[in-house]
Image (cartoon, rainbow, N blue to C red):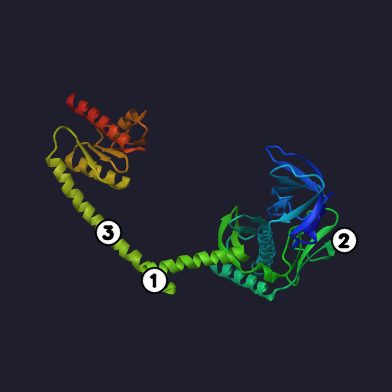
């Protein structure tokens, strides 16, 4: 059994202990057991601690019954060793685990929503709560109340009780363990059965920032950050806002109005561009039809969207009563439109295997896309040859 120092001394950063056993680990590295450890193993939604044992990096920490197993990059020495916690990682976990307790308590009190699960990742933390939806106003209210409790700086106590004593406490939910139960009490806020590491007072949680919410398996998942992560997120957001403010020449509070004005201007420009494109296509269609030789038209065009390319091919085919084969060299796309003869989709389906392209279509319109302009060019020439042979045989 390992003496688990993280239960009673979460602020312990460095200590000396004896290596009781060690063995090679599957997949490389070594595993070792300490007489006493402050390394927290994975559990309760909280990731494990990292750090060093005798100067060797600890890469993972797990629990096997009452034993804590430390995975190291290389073989540790015998006897007594110096152990160090990666304190920045530990304190981040303490802030977020305590922040989760606080936020869960607020969700239960303010929104009547029990917390179903908790996950602490490297970018953000999440809780799933027993609600089908949550409005923006409710989100803002939860965040405000959580930060009010942070500012109150109430004490957070951790202690062990018997099952009988636990039954007398107003726990958020019944403990999932048998025997003695570790209680984390946020004074005046909640009692929770929990084995994780926590800060000593809510003030150390730092700011609590709700990032967003989404529906997940019929419930609401809340994304949040606490403490230094929340401050870093604010600094990044403020930096983006400042850069946008300078770039757009507008104060921060007027950025939305400026963006809306730019969107309106863009819509106008796109409409004008579409008008000019349609007018230009009209000239192109007449030019191609007037210069037509043979039973079809084949033409290379500049960069266009697939929708624009298809529209142009259909317009040529309808106005000229002739098949239209178009190649967008920049995008590596080929489109064929006709009145149904030849059948566009069937021709492309027969010609595509081995070309590196993908596509398909129906009788009157087909399209194909290629990874390179050379592949598209070869396919374009192949279809020209097929169209030429088709009309020469008529």
Please say whether residue 193 is visible from this viewpoint. Answer: yes
* Residue 132 placement: quadrant: bottom right
Q: Quadrant of the C terminus?
A: top left
Residue 352, above or below 312 = above
**CA gap, disc 2 and disc 1:** 61 Å
Separation of residues labelled 3 and 1 (CA atoms): 21 Å
Mark 2 touching mark 1, by CB under 8 A? no
The residue tagged 3 is 271
Determine whether label 3 and label 2 are within 8 Å by CB.
no
Q: Nearer the viewer, residue 86 or 362?
A: 86
Residue neighbourhood size for the residue with mark 1, other residues' Cα within 10 Å, grouped as few (<14), some (14–19), many (≥20): few
Secondary structure of residue under mark 1: helix
Of the residues under marks 2 and 1, which one precedes in the sequence?
2
Looking at this view, is 53 or 140 the one in front?
Answer: 53
> Where is residue 243 shown, x and y percent of the image?
43, 66
> Residue 306 at x, y = what percent?
32, 45
Q: Quadrant of residue 11?
A: bottom right
Compared to residue 214, the image places residue 77 above or below, namely above
Mark 2 lies on residue = 164
Residue at x-position 34% and y-position 68%: 261
Between discs 3 and 2, the one toward the N terminus: 2
Mark 2 crowd level (few <14, some 14–19, many ≥20, 10 Å Cα): few
Residue 177 on image: x %, y %: 80, 53
Q: Could you tell whether 274 is left or right of 132 in the image?
A: left
Left or right, 219 with respect to 328, comes to: right
Q: Return the residue at label 1.
A: 257
Q: Nearer the viewer, mark 2 or mark 1?
A: 1
Report the Cα–Cα distance between label 3 and label 2.
74 Å
**SS for callout 3:** helix
């Amino acid at each position: 059994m390992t003496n688990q120092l993280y239960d009673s001394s979460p602020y312990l950063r460095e200590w000396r202990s004896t290596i009781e056993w060690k063995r090679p680990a599957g997949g490389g590295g070594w595993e070792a057991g300490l007489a006493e450890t402050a390394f927290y193993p994975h559990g309760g939604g909280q990731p494990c601690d990292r750090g060093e044992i005798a100067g060797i990096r600890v890469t993972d920490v797990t629990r096997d019954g009452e034993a804590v197993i430390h995975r190291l990059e290389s073989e540790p020495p015998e006897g007594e060793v110096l152990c160090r916690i990666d304190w920045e990682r530990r304190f981040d976990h303490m802030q977020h685990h305590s922040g989760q307790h606080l936020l869960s308590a607020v969700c239960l009190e303010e929104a009547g929503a029990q917390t179903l699960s908790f996950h602490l990742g490297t970018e953000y933390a999440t809780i799933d709560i027993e609600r089908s939806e949550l409005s923006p106003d409710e989100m803002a209210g939860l965040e405000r109340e959580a930060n009010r409790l942070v500012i109150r700086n109430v004490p957070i106590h951790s202690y062990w009780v018997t099952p009988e004593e636990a039954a007398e406490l107003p726990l958020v939910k019944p403990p999932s363990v048998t025997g003695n139960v570790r209680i984390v009490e946020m004074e005046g806020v909640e009692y929770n059965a929990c084995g994780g590491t926590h800060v000593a007072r809510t003030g150390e949680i730092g700011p609590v920032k709700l990032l967003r919410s989404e529906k997940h398996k019929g419930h609401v998942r809340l994304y949040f950050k606490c403490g230094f992560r929340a401050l870093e997120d604010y600094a990044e957001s403020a930096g983006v806002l400042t850069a946008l403010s300078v770039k757009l020449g507008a104060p921060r509070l007027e950025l939305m109005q400026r963006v809306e004005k730019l969107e309106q201007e863009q819509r106008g420009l796109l409409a004008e561009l579409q008008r000019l494109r349609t007018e230009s296509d009209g000239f192109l269609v007449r030019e191609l039809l007037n210069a037509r030789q043979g039973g079809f038209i084949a033409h290379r065009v500049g960069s266009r969207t697939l929708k624009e390319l298809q529209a142009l091919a259909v317009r040529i085919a309808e106005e000229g009563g002739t098949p239209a084969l178009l190649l967008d060299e920049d995008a590596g796309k080929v489109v064929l439109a006709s009145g149904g003869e030849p059948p566009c989709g069937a021709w492309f389906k027969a010609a595509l295997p081995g070309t590196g392209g993908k596509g398909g279509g129906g009788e009157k319109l087909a399209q194909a896309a290629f990874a390179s302009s050379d592949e598209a060019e070869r396919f374009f020439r192949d279809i020209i040859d097929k169209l030429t042979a088709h009309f020469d045989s008529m």
